[in-house]
Amino acid sequence: MRLRNLLSLLLVAPFLAACVNDSATYEIDNTREHALSLIREQPYFWDSKVNLYLVVSRLPACMRRHSIGQGTEKTKVEIYQLPSGVIIVRADRHMFATESRTCEGFSKLDAEPPDGMGKLKGTFRVRKGELGFFKAEGESSAAGE
């Protein structure tokens, strides 16, 4: 019986290894309480598509998870911020606007905002096999910059 369980586990292991289920976080004010997190989930090992979710949080006031559609394991997600505080998220050809005051404002954009994209804060991407957030060149780690 133990041998059968071990063999079953060994047969299933390669399929589970192909699945993606990870996340990375951008700390807006260099605090975990005010952050954007990207979650990638691959529900089926045979499908190359991953579901992408953005979690907007400003604790203890709010936290909300928004779907930003599907991508691949290599999809880059860029984060821009307008002076008004609106956050623009671009994943491939899709763009979204959100905010972290109430975490409820979220909408899909059909085109670039008339005032522009704002300042590039950084990009969620895979590097050396791991998803991470990489700050844009010139972005410092000081709060509010």
Image (cartoon, grey):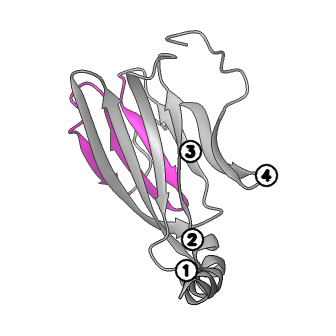
- The residues tagged by marks 3 and 2 sit, at their Cα atoms, a distance apart of 23 Å
The numbered disc on residue 78 is 3
Image depth: mark 4 or mark 1 in front: 1
Residue 118 visible somewhere in the drawing: no
The picture quadrant where one finds residue 64 is top left
Q: Secondary structure at mark 3?
A: strand
Mark 3 and mark 4: span between their CA atoms?
18 Å
Work out how far the residue at label 4 is from the one at label 1, CA to CA, in angstroms.
Answer: 20 Å
| Dot 2 or dot 1, earlier in sequence | 2
Label 1 SS: loop
Answer few, some or many: residues within 10 Å of disc 2's Cα (few below 14, many 20 plus, some between 14 and 19).
Answer: some
Q: Where's residue 33, x and y in %?
A: 38, 21
Percent coordinates x, y for residue 88 in the rendering = 43, 40
Question: What residue does disc 4 label?
Answer: 128
Mark in front: 3 vs 4 = 4
Q: Which residues are magenta?
A: 85-110
The verdict on residue 94 being magenta is yes
In front: 76, or 39?
Answer: 39
